[in-house]
Amino acid sequence: MSKLKRKRQKKIKQVSKSVAKIVSLFLILGMLFIVVLQHLSTSVQQTNDSSDTQEQTQQTFIAELLPHAKELQKQYGILPSIILGQAILESDWGKSQLGKDYHNLFGIKAGDAEDKVELKTKEYEDGKWKEITAAFKVYPNWQASMTDHTLLFVNGVSWNTTIYQNVLKATNYKVAAQALQDAGYATDPDYASKITSVIETYQLNQYD
């Protein structure tokens, strides 16, 4: 066999090996691409499922509170959007420890002779947030918490029985939210805007 022929065969073998390596590389890359696509597809599906589940949970929470909120509106004039908006903001859709375990949806504090539980919370004082331990009321169910919340607006507090009257008189959720903040319901300086944001995000004013 001539040297030229041997060189050609050697070159052909080298080219074949190179082609085989390239083909193998493309196959591996192709398989990796498919795996990545499958993973992304699964992640997107899980995200969609999670979003759907969260939305269903939120709608269930609203549906559970709405009938009693409407009853309280009929009896006392309080806007359902304010009841629902505060419940969502204060209890994180009923998932907070206070809301879930003790049925207190609104962070209402307890008096000396009332059933209570002590939990850590945050208060805004002197221009900054501080963690404190406070005594909160314990309720048998969410509806009892809603009733007590409304009666707080109706009866006020011992040192000012009319402090929440502007909340009850309000026919607009924005006015009611601002009245809550002005009356000092919460120490959060952005409380009114947060309540308003919740109401508008979930269109709770449709129930007013």
Image: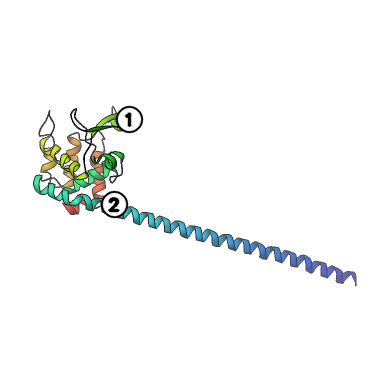
Question: x, y (%) of residue 26?
Answer: 63, 63
Label 2 sits on residue: 58
Question: Is 137 rendered above or below residue 29?
Answer: above
The structure residue drawn at horizontal position 14% and vertical position 50%, both measured from the top left corner, is 70
Return the x and y of residue 64 as percentages of the image width and height. 22, 51
The residue lying toward the viewer, choosing from 53 and 15, is 53
**Horizontally, is 8 left or right of 207 in the view?**
right
Q: Of 38 and 190, which appears nearest the observer?
A: 38
Q: Quadrant of residue 103?
A: top left
Q: Secondary structure at mark 1?
A: strand
Question: Which is nearer the N-term, disc 2 or disc 1?
Answer: 2
Q: Which residue is mark 1?
A: 131
Task: Point out residue 90 in the picture as x, y percentages from the top left corner.
Answer: 26, 41
Q: Quadrant of residue 143?
A: top left
The N terminus lies in quadrant: bottom right
Q: Nearer the viewer, residue 93 or 185?
A: 93
User: CA gap, disc 2 to disc 1?
Assistant: 28 Å
Which color scheme did the rendering employ for the protein? rainbow
Q: Residues within 10 Å of mark 1 (few under 14, many from 20)?
A: few
Q: Determine crowd level at label 2: few under 14, some 14-19, many 20+ residues with C-alpha closer than 10 A.
A: some
Which amino acid is tagged 1?
Glu
